[in-house]
Amino acid sequence: MNSDPVPPSVPRIPPPPRRNTGGEQLLQPDADKCVLARLRVRWNETLICPSPIKPGDRRKGWFNRRGDQLWTNDGSYKPASPGEEYPVDLDSYPEYGIGWMNESGIRIDMEHRLIPKAPLRSALKQTQPQV
């Protein structure tokens, strides 16, 4: 009769290494292998990490997502060239008819009023309202 409560199909994970009172870590023989097995990551050569556009490479001026450039304060703009609408570098810009954004990330609406940035989420603990 087997007194082990863990079924044989489940791999046994040894307990974590214990520390001596002096601070040195006493390693058990198989502890390193278990840690390495849990930390393995599968790597695929097709993974691509998108890099942000460098500030020097950003378009200068006021643009919308379609690629139109605001030219004057009365609302005149230069439309995007045919076939070059919605370029990838303007993905985070406001949609056509909503507003404009410049290279510093400042957004304005169609009446040239500043659109405030969304407030950052508070780092403080959110308390539940008392009922």
Image: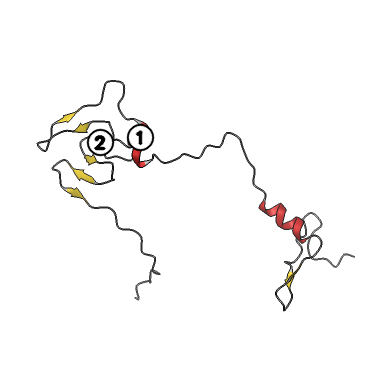
Mark identifier at residue 21: none
- Find disc 2 in the rendering and name its residue: 64
Within-10-Å neighbours for mark 2: few <14, some 14–19, many 20+: many
The amino acid type of the residue labelled 1 equals Asp
- Residue 3 or 113: which is nearer the viewer? 113
Q: Which residue ends up furthest to the bottom in the rendered image?
A: 21
- Residue 50 or 118: which is nearer the viewer? 50
Residue at 70%, 74% (x, y): give it: 23
Q: Where 66 falls versus 52 (above or below)?
A: above
Within-10-Å neighbours for mark 1: few <14, some 14–19, many 20+: some
- Find disc 1 in the rendering and name its residue: 89
Image quarter hosting the C terminus: bottom left
- Residue 14 or 116: which is nearer the viewer? 116
Image quarter hosting the N terminus: bottom right
Q: Is residue 74 left or right of residue 126?
A: left
Q: Which residue ends up furthest to the right in the rendered image?
A: 1
Where, by quadrant of the figure, is residue 27 drawn?
Answer: bottom right
Please provide percent x and percent y for residue 90: 32, 35
